[in-house]
Structure formats: C-alpha cells, structure tokens
Amino acid sequence: MLDFIKINHDDKVAVALHPLEKGSVLNVDGEEITLIEDIPQAHKFALKDIKEGEPIIKYGLRIGYAKEDIKKGAWIHVHNIRTALGDKLEYKYEPDIPVVAPTEHVTFRGFRRKDGKVGIRNDIWILPTVGCVNSVVKGMEQMAKEQFALGNVEEGVEDIYCFNHPYGCSQMGDDQENTRKVLASIIHHPNAAGVLVVGLGCENSNIPVLMDYIGEYDPERIKFLVCQDFEDENEEAMKLIGEIYEAASKDKREDIDASELVVGLKCGASDGMSGITANPTVGAFSDILASKGGTTIMTEVPEMFGAETILMNRCKDEATFEKTVKLINDFKQYFMDHHQTIYENPSPGNKKGGISTLEDKSCGCTQKAGTAPVCGVLQYAEPVKEKGLNLLSAPGNDLVAATATAVSGAHMVLFTTGRGTPFATLVPTMKISSNSKIAGYKKNWIDFNAGRMVEDMTKEQVAQALFDYVLKVASGEKVKSEAAGFHDIAIFKQGVTL
C-alpha cells in the first residue's frame, strides 16, 4: 500500500494513507520530505514551506489560508488553516462543458408501472400524514407483515413498511408546503407497488388537503385511511392493504434499460479519504451512468460552498448556470437569515477524519459529480426531469439530503462514508466506504469498499465494479441497511412550529 497520495500536480499538501511517524522520509515528485510531526491517517502534511496568509492547495484548489507559517513536513489541520469563505458572491459563466460519449446499453430487472415509470422495488408503503399516528402505522406494518406473504425479487410484494416522521401539523408557510410536497412525491414513487396513506383527521396536512398535491393516482394501488373515522383503524388498514396486495402480487420484473435508472449521490460521516477514493469512485460511476443515458442527483448545497464554480462552469447552458448561482446564493441567504455563519462546517467527526475546512470538505464532496455536464437544477421536492447530472437544493444533513434525492425520483442512493453510518432512506441506500479499515470493521453497514482504489485497483476498475453492483441492487439484491429493516425519512424543517 502507498504511504501517501498527492491528488493534483499543483497541490501544496499530500494526504497520509496510513499513520505516518515523525521523522519518516518520503519521496514526493523526486524530492525528499522529512515529516516533522506524526501525521494521522487521511490527514494532510505540507510539501513545502507555506507562509502565513498563503493559500493551502489541495485537489488543485484553494481549501483555505495558512493561519501561521507552516514548515515543510508539518501536519496541516484546523490548528493552522482557516477558511477563505464569506458571504454571497457574484459569479461569471465561464463554460468548460465536457462531452459525454455514449456507451453500450445495459439493462437491469425492474418493474414497469402503469404510468410508464420504473421501480426497482415492489414494496407496499404505509405513510402517515402526521406524526400523531406514527405508533399506529408502526403497528399496522407489523400486522401486515404477519398477515401477507412476501415474495422474492422477481415477482410479487417484496416488503411492507412504514415511514414515520414528526410533521404534518402545527406548521406554517414554506415549511408546511415542504411536508405536503414530500408526502405527495413519496405516494407517487415508483419503488412502491402501492401506498396506504394514514391520517388522523384533524391535522393541517390532512388527506383532503393533500389531494390537491397528489393529483391523479391509481385507486387500485393508492388507498386512504382517516383513523378518526373508524372504530377499529387496524381492521380497516388490513382490508385496504389486502386490496393493494392483491393488485401488486401480480407484478413481475422485466428487463429495463439503464437509461431509466435514477441514482442519488450523497456523502456523510466523511474522512480525509472520502474525497480521494469513495467520492471520485461515485463520480466515475455517475459518468458511466450518464454515458448510458441515465440520471444522477447530487445535493448537499452547503458542501458545495468553496467548490461551486467547478459545477457552475460545467452547466450545459447559461440558464442552468443561473439556476446554479441561485441554488448557491439562496442557501447562503438561508444561513444568513438564521444568523448563522456560512462556513459552520465540517463536523467534529469530519475534523477527526482529516477534513480541515469547508472548502476541503466541498472539494472532496463535489468529486461525486464526476466530470459530466450539469444538466438540471432542482428545487427541494421538485421531480427530476433532465437526464444526466442534476443538482438539488437540500442541506448536508444525511437523512434530510438522502430523503430529498429519493423524493425527487432517485431509485437508490449511493452514500459514501469514511467513518460509517447505518441509516437508510425510503429507497435502497448503499454504503460505500472510503477505506478498507471501516469496510472490514463495519461489515454489517458497508456494502462496497472504494478504499481499494489506493490498494490494488484503479479508479476506473472500482467504478465499473460499483456500476455492476448497482445493476444487481436495481434488479432486487438488497443492500445491508435494507436487509436490517432500516427505512427512515426526514423532511427539511425550515419554519415556525405552532
């Protein structure tokens, strides 16, 4: 295994691939560098003397400024580097739009819905309109699992589960709108063979109100239950789920072209290796899927700050560029409106893992976007329309962001991590490790090890292996969070609670 990696020719730092001891002598681009401090795994060390105020360059980009003079071979982290970020900026469109050459078509085994959409799962979902009935729908889930037989990956109903959340009442304005849009989008998600929508009856976002957001629906697959209207809501629920089950039990997988696959891109519990292995692997995967006519959705807008111009200059046209500028500046305004610093990031876990500034994190985070053009920009809860790479307005919070990509149409989420996390959203959530240590240590969480990129495989080889695995998951193979029964949603909370 290599001792370190220098990511870009212009970098002033390199990253330790395992703990390096003080006094170690390393050969970097033909120059011997003696470490003057211990360097933890995934942390940075200086390749040259850096004066106070000079930019720190990693990924070929500025990730901050030196707080003090830094000697060659010194450890570079939060104690001697500061962010260069500030408030909203003005941007100029300087297009550098890559060309994605088409590659041969491949297929996966999915479910074709009546409306023409494609699903990769055939589950029955139980969706509460309000947090007051969370315990009720959890009980319905258990009853339904016991009452109805679950099928295999090729036909029939695969699973039955509910999505608890605390919202649907005592909300105002855009906050309430978010909840209603999200619930309507979940109801129409093609991974669901059918949905039972369960309301209390007196909430703000009650079922009659939601109907305006839901629009047209298949009454054979979408059913509604108001708990206050029935003496025994569980009995009525089993009746309605039975009707959905009867229709869905006839569903069978068929060959679907990969151009119809939509994949969300997310990172969390990151470390200093995330931007070197896992995120570039996912970026290369995104490019492969784009070359086959497929779609990816990347979010975490606050973790684009400091690297946003890379994405802006890849926008397919000026209109998309302007939407990206608005995406970035609107999110900065959101921070400012709440009197919060724009650069209040990275997290303690990120810092422990070797990430020093938000720019450091952002340059690593945006590696997930690969090299393809930015073809679409989505508002929160807006359905994806453009093929290729899309940017979505949502925060960096793992559960909120992953849910947002699913709500916008992602069939699954690729979630890179350097420290590990067990959660899953409403669609299959594949955990991709940045290093082999966490892949071995948390085998019950990690589905794919991108750490091999600095061991025995090239980025292209790891990305192709990931693409092949994604097709298997799209065809019914369960990821580990699914097998464990993890299914969570989190709605973006922005406003006042009454």
Image (cartoon, rainbow, N blue to C red):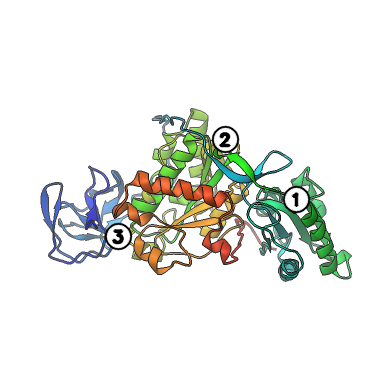
Q: Residue at x 75, y 64 (%)?
A: 148
For disc 1, the marked residue is 250
Q: Amino acid at mark 1?
A: Lys
Q: Position of residue 208 (x, y in %)?
A: 82, 52
Q: Within 10 angstroms of label 3, few (less than 14), some, or many (20 or more) residues?
A: many
233 sits to left or right of 190:
right
Quadrant occupied by the C terminus: bottom right
For disc 2, the marked residue is 386
- In 3D space, how far apart are the residues under numbered discs 3 and 2 (Cα atoms)? 36 Å
- In 3D space, how far apart are the residues under numbered discs 3 and 1 (Cα atoms)? 50 Å
Name the mark on residue 42: 3
Q: Amino acid at mark 3?
A: Ala
Q: Position of residue 448 (x, y in %)?
A: 44, 57
- Determine whether 56 is above or below 202 in the image: above
**Residue 114 location, quadrant:** top right
Q: Within 10 angstroms of label 1, few (less than 14), some, or many (20 or more) residues?
A: few
Q: Position of residue 255 (x, y in %)?
A: 61, 41
54 sits to left or right of 190:
left
182 sits to left or right of 144:
left
Name the one closer to the observer, 144 or 10: 144
Name the one closer to the observer, 172 or 354: 354
Name the mark on residue 77: none
Name the one closer to the observer, 362 or 186: 186
Does residue 383 appear anywhere in the picture?
Answer: no
Of the two numbered discs 3 and 1 on the same chain, state the one appearing first in sequence.
Answer: 3
- Determine whether 55 is above or below 488 in the image: above
Q: Position of residue 266 (x, y in %)?
A: 48, 52
Of the two numbered discs 2 and 1 on the same chain, state the one appearing first in sequence.
Answer: 1
Does residue 24 appear anywhere in the picture?
Answer: yes
Of the two numbered discs 3 and 2 on the same chain, state the one appearing first in sequence.
Answer: 3
